[in-house]
Every structure is written in structure tokens, then in C-alpha cells.
Amino acid sequence: MKRTLASLALILFGVSAVKAQLNVYYIDVGQGDATYMELPNGHNVLIDGGPSGEPVYKFLKEKGVTTIDHVVLTHPHSDHYRGLKKVFAAFDVKNFYDSRAENVDAKGDNNLRELADAEPGCKTHYPEAGDNLNWDSRVTVKVLNTCSEPVQLKYNDDVNNCSLVLRFFYNGTGLLFTGDAESVIENAMMRVFKSGLESYALKVGHHGSRYSSTSQFLARVRPKVAIISAGVDNVYGHPHKEALDRLTTAGAKIFYTPGTTQTLVIPAPKKGVAAQVIGPLPYDPERPVQPEIEVLIYTPPVAVPLNVNSVPLEQLMRAAGE
Ligand SMILES: [Zn+2]
């Protein structure tokens, strides 16, 4: 038993094996967003930094991170950019991805572009919708929305709708990150990307706001799991009941970040075996292998052969599909 758990640990989080799987950490940052990812090729990604530096800094330090290959700011609202200031100060950032949206209310506070410019060896990118980001040859990373033309914005909705939306696809499994994009952008993405939105895990738009996650959008995404990042008793009332109801009706199982970072693992592809995604599960740095994982390990169903001598003819014909 001990041995099984040890080998499981190696399969799931071991140093050598970890490179072939894709790990996602929906970090508990309170009312805001921050997602850390380890790609199969060993490169890492941070999408947003949460509302303050400490939670994301603590998480990355605990993981032993020193360098981040790709840092993404979905849109210039403080619950997404503020935590990234400390990230630039404390870690080596190689690439920074930004929209060209300028939140006039964030002037003097959102200095990430300056920080990225000042970061030695860091390149800033302003991708466009439809771009494929070449981060790992085995993972498709597609930009589904952004504001790639410079635009000065004042209203929250307009800033939200500039969110850099990313979809990852690895081993038959899609992961969608919609930032704070609202229904108007969901509709636009549906028109352009159609079934290209389908994703196993949806990082729920705008912290579960009622103005995102429309039924039509969810019917396109078809999420199996939905992860909501929001603070306990936040002033916005996120997540809203309407959005939760729509997610449940769409068949998604809902997970929350308050109280725990949620982790999700897409295993390395195995010939003839459908990917069995692990999680979301609570993240515990002291105990990386959760006991629940054992029951989530994929076991291919074995069809018991029917005994032609004892089973009635009718049943045999049914089994043969006749
Ligand atoms: Zn937000």
C-alpha cells in the first residue's frame, strides 16, 4: 500500500513525471484571480496575480518557483494586476502578455508595463484574438479575446470585456480562462470559435457574476467542472445565484477557491486511453498526494465475457447488439 502511494506520488507530482502532465493551480487569492500552471515541457504560466501580493507570492515561494516563463494580465483591474507587482519584484519573468486596454482609473497604480520593461530579459507581448501562443509544442494555447488596439477605458464593463481570454488544449482536455469577460464577449466568442470553446474545466467568468456564464455560452463550452475564484462575503455578492444555477443546469460541478487553492491535473497522453483528469482537489503543499486521488485513478472498464452455456440466448443477442 505504502509503495502504491509512493509510486502514485511519483506519477502525479514526481519530478520526472511531472513534466509530461499539465498541472493547474487555481490559487486562493481572495476576491480576485490568479492561476498558476505547469506545462508538460516544464515551462510555467501565471494568469493574473490577485488583489494583493502576498497570497500569490506565498504560493509561488512554497512551490520553489524562481522564474516564470509566461505572466498574463487578463485586464487592468486591481483584483487581477496588483498581485503581479510583487511577482515582478520577487521572480524572474521572461514574458509578459497584456491587452492594450488602459483603465484610466488605474493610472499610477497599474505599472506592470513599466515593471515588465525594467525586468531584465523580459519581453512584452500584445497578442490578438485568434493567435496561437507557442508555449509548449504539445499544448494548444489560443487567444479567444483581447483588446489589441490601444483604448482608454473608464467603465468597469468595458475593461472587463477587454479580458485576454485563453483556451488550453492538452490530451483531449480543454481549459478555458475567460477573465472577467461578460455576456457580450461570450456571444462574440461563440460566433467566432463555435465548438472550439468546448472545455472540460471552465474558470468561471467574472468571479461567478450574473452578467457572465450565459446558458447559451455554457451550452457551447460544456464544462464538466467550473472553478469560481471569489472572496468570502465579498461586496459584489459573487458568485451570483443566477450564474450558479446556469452552471448546475449545464451539468458542471462547481468548485470554489475560498479556503483552498484548487488543483487539476491532466495526465500525459497514453495510447488508447482517454484522459482521466484529476481534480479539482484541495491543494496541500505538505501532503501533495490527496487520499481521494486513489479513487480517481483511471481504471479501464473490463467487460466480463458472457458464458454461452449459462446465459439465455436473448441476453447473448442483446450483448452482441442484435
Ligand atoms: Zn475581477
Image (cartoon, rainbow, N blue to C red):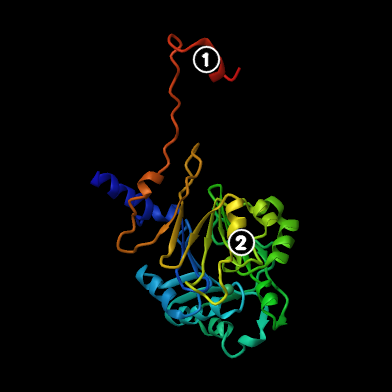
The percent coordinates of residue 245 (x first, y second) are 60, 57
In percent of the image, x 50 and y 36: which residue is there?
A: 272
Q: Is mark 2 within 8 Å of ligand 1?
A: no
Q: Residue furthest top?
A: 309
* In-image side of 321 versus 37 (left or right): right
Q: Few, some or many C-alpha atoms within 10 Å of disc 2 (few <14, some 14-19, many ≥20)?
A: many
Quarter for ligand 1? bottom right
User: Cβ–Cβ below 8 Å for labels 1 and 2?
Assistant: no
Q: Few, some or many C-alpha atoms within 10 Å of disc 1 (few <14, some 14-19, many ≥20)?
A: some
Specify the amino acid type for callout 1: Leu
Q: Nearer the viewer, residue 217 or 65?
A: 217
Say above or below: 96 vs 312. below
Which disc number belongs to residue 316?
A: 1
Looking at the rendered image, the quarter that the N terminus falls into is: top left
Q: Quadrant for residue 76, please give it.
A: bottom right
Residue 10 appearing in the image? yes
Say above or below: 321 vs 43. above
Residue 133 appearing in the image? no
Label 1 or label 2, whichever lies nearer to me, is 2
In percent of the image, x 45 and y 26: which residue is there?
A: 303
Say above or below: 9 vs 242. above
Looking at the rendered image, the quarter that the C terminus falls into is: top right
In percent of the image, x 40 and y 44: which residue is there?
A: 297
The percent coordinates of residue 140 (x first, y second) are 59, 56
The percent coordinates of residue 118 (x first, y second) are 53, 85
Which disc number belongs to residue 31?
A: none
* In-image side of 156 versus 138 (left or right): right
The percent coordinates of residue 189 (x first, y second) are 71, 60
Q: Nearer the viewer, residue 316 or 268?
A: 316
In percent of the image, x 56 and y 82: which residue is there?
A: 112
Identify the residue under disc 2. Answer: 243
